[in-house]
């Protein structure tokens, strides 16, 4: 069965999300678009939350998140233990996010990154396998981090 990629963005990431959805489809993967669907101002934590829910209940296996800088929405997404969201800025960081960190969510800054670099990040992220080996135990520890307070 084909993998489903869930995509979500706030208003700062809306344009880039629209531009990137065809890249996912071109790779033969299904897309679940959770919005936002306009330039109207919204709150990025709500979209990170929606994406995490789609991963948790199995509607999607990996994700793409975009806000203006990529920072806020990656902070929000990484509050979920099973999310490994990587804010990437080029093909190298996207490749390492998969090879070393088994990242399951690619995060981009819609007001930061150019469209061609964003496409490179997304294609690399979706086609690069996890290296496992020495990285497997480290990634496993990420899921065991205790929550203070
Ligand atoms: C929204 O204006 C902006 O703050 C948001 O997209 C993001 O950059 C937050 O980290």
Image (cartoon, grey):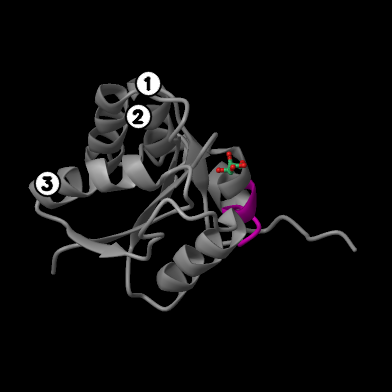
Image coords of residue 71 (percent x, y): 60, 38
Q: Is residue 79 magenta?
A: yes
Taking 118 as reference, is 49 above or below it?
Answer: below
User: Residues under labels 2 and 1: Cα distance?
Assistant: 5 Å
The magenta-colored residue range is 75-80
Q: Position of residue 10 (x, y in %)?
A: 48, 52
Judging by the rendered image, the residue that carries numbered circle 2 is 95
Q: Earlier in the sequence, mark 3 or mark 1?
A: 3
Left or right of 118 on screen, residue 10:
right
Q: Secondary structure at mark 2?
A: helix
SS state under label 3: loop
Instruction: Kindly identify which residue carries mark 1.
Output: 92
Quarter of the figure with the N terminus: bottom left
Is 89 left or right of 32, judged from the image as shown?
A: right
* Spatial separation of the CA atoms under disc 3 and disc 1: 19 Å
Seen at 54% across and 54% down, the residue is 41
Tell me whether circle 2 and circle 1 mark residues in contact (CB < 8 Å): yes
Q: Is the CB of mark 3 within 8 Å of ligand 1?
A: no
- The crowding category of the residue bearing disc 2, from other C-alpha atoms within 10 Å (few below 14, some 14 to 19, many at least 20), is many
Q: Which residue is mark 3?
A: 27
Residue in the foreground of this view, choosing between 18 and 95:
18
Does the residue tagged 1 have its C-beta within 8 Å of any atom of ligand 1?
no
Q: Residue furthest bottom?
A: 57
Few, some or many residues within 10 Å of mark 3 (<14, 14–19, 20+) = few
Q: Secondary structure at mark 1?
A: helix
In the depicted structure, whether residue 13 falls above or below residue 78: above
Residue at point 42%, 78% (across, down): 57
Q: Is residue 49 magenta?
A: no
């Amino acid at each position: 069965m084909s993998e489903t990629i869930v995509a979500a963005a706030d208003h700062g990431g809306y344009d880039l999300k629209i531009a990137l959805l065809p890249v996912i489809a071109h790779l033969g993967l299904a897309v679940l678009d959770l919005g936002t669907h306009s330039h109207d101002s919204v709150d990025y934590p709500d979209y990170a939350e929606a994406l995490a829910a789609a991963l948790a209940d199995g509607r999607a296996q990996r994700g793409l998140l975009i806000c203006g800088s990529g920072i806020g929405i990656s902070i929000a997404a990484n509050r979920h233990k099973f999310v490994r969201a990587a804010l990437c800025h080029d093909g190298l960081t996207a490749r390492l996010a998969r090879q070393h960190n088994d990242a399951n969510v690619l995060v981009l800054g819609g007001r930061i990154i150019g469209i061609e670099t964003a496409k490179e990040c997304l294609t690399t992220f979706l086609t690069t396998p996890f290296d496992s080996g020495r990285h497997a135990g480290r990634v496993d520890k990420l899921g065991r981090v205790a929550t203070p307070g």
